[in-house]
Image (cartoon, rainbow, N blue to C red):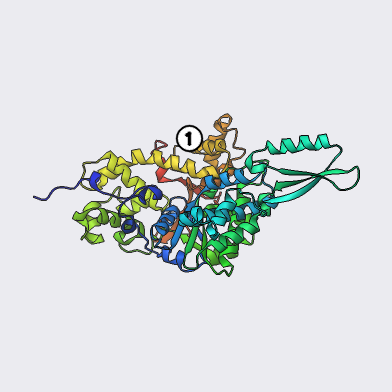
Amino acid sequence: MEERTCLKDLFIGKTDGAVESKEDNFQELFYDPFNKYKELMSGKEKFLVLGFKGTGKTYLAKYVEAMAKRGQYVNIVGENDFILCKLNVMSQEKLDEELANALCKWFLLDRLARLVIESRPIRAKWIPFSKTYSLNKFLKYFESDDIFKQVKMIAESTKEMKTQCEASLDKNKKNRKYSILGTKNKGEKYSVENVRKEFFELIQPLEQKVFKAIGKRDSYTIIVDDLDEIKNNEESVGRDEVIINMLKVAREYNLKKMPIDLKYVILLRTEILDDLQVKYSNLNKTITSCSVELYWLFDSTYSEPYNHPLMSMILHKIKKKSQKYSNYSNKELYELLFPESIDNKKPLDYLLDYGFGRPRDFVTFLDCAQKMCPDQGCFNAHVMKEARKKYSPCFYEELLNQSAYYGNPEFVTQCLQLLSSVKKASFTHAYFEAIYNEGKDNYPCIESVDDALKFLYKIGAIGNSWKVSQGNGIKKTHFGWAYKKDAMNDVDLSKRFTIHYGLRKKFSM
């Protein structure tokens, strides 16, 4: 008798692409139905990877890293690397507009330099006359004519000059000064100090050194992720300006004719770039010609549910990790594991309704099903309904997390609290306003109902709904969601609103 397979034995993927990339057969597990890897790596002009949170940007970056062959070097860096770089090179905390571009250029060159040094450790440490050794020496703040400049200072007395000289020698290695005493005219005494240059004065020599250190047969790719995690500072240039300048610098290097094989890739959330376009009109040409977009919600173009990209992704991972199912067709495996409708919905439609059309939503929901009913043999109606209890709080927390970009966590939390007070899956503007006025003191950060509704629509917590006549007195309900390409970017306040299925269990609906 064939041994029965339980849900707990199935591998349906990990919610974090970086975690899944640790799997032994990650390259086989990787699923790319739209050939985005090939599109991204086909040329230097494609360097911007766009997608909503959870659509697979980091996952794609990890695949690029995993596919690197001999002589190909890839490094993925994030917001922590940028922050440490900023702290390391800037003497002041404030980042003004004039320094933002220079810092982004320094950061990208610095990350490249460190990758070059890492790829050639012997030359970097033990061959003094190599270009990699010179680069390594430069980054470690060795004495060099490139790193220091002379500053002449006039002093009134030799005593004052000696005191100044002693003080300069007490500085740490990074900021040390070397003083030389002398006289130019009778009665005039002076000192010449070697003072460390500011980082922006070192960009050109760093660029020259790192480019010279790159071998003609080598290929280097730097991938920048999680820029949206950079915190805004009210007294400094904000995160948006950093992102814009990072895009500008990456574009400059990628499109510049160079004798070396170098590529910078920027991963960015779609909704963030949409917001930035309002502030920076020149972004559109970069998006049009230089971006690779990750979007999975093509639910109207697949006649069979098992051929939909998201469902096919799940089936692909199961087959790659389970020898028992490795030879099954998508159709056979789908019918075996998803045998019945749930509340008159096909399993695919049910999963689509409970998420934002992202790989992370499917994996999270089915992972909850596995945890709630580990010994079941398939994702039947009972299992899927049970999964909602665990999934809905996870979906809520994910929504809070991805809304952090918009700032003011109190406003975000109060908008969702207000929505949870509605207790109706579908409602009107007037009804929502009545609920708000009834408990207005509980929502001090919400200045207007319209602002709350616009925000809730923007993050996908609510959508618009309306009925369209199909003839013969039959009306069909249509829905508009901000995360879908075929919907309006802004909410229609005159239409009804519907609460996302993923939140309803959390809100006790």
* Residue 79, horizontal then vertical, whole percent: 53, 47
Q: Which residue is mark 1?
A: 421
Q: Identify residue type, mark 1.
A: Ser
* Residue 365, horizontal then vertical, whole percent: 34, 46
Near mark 1 (Cα within 10 A), the count class, few <14, some 14-19 or many ≥20, is: some
Q: Is residue 489 visible?
A: no
Quarter-of-image position of residue 204: bottom right
Q: Viewer-proximal residue, 208 or 52?
A: 208
* Residue 436, horizontal then vertical, whole percent: 55, 35
Residue drawn at the location 29% of the way across and 57% of the way down:
316
Quarter the C terminus occupies: top left
Residue at far right of view: 186
Q: Is residue 252 left or right of residue 46?
A: right
Q: Is residue 20 left or right of residue 176?
A: left
Q: Viewer-proximal residue, 428 or 98?
A: 98
Quarter-of-image position of residue 69: bottom left
Position of residue 156 relative to residue 255, above or below, is above
Quarter-of-image position of residue 313: bottom left
Q: Secondary structure at mark 1?
A: loop
Residue drawn at the location 51% of the way across and 49% of the way down:
78
* Residue 171, horizontal then vertical, whole percent: 67, 38
Q: Is residue 397 visible?
A: yes
Q: Viewer-proximal residue, 395 or 184?
A: 184
Residue at far left of view: 1
Position of residue 438 relative to residue 477, above or below, is above
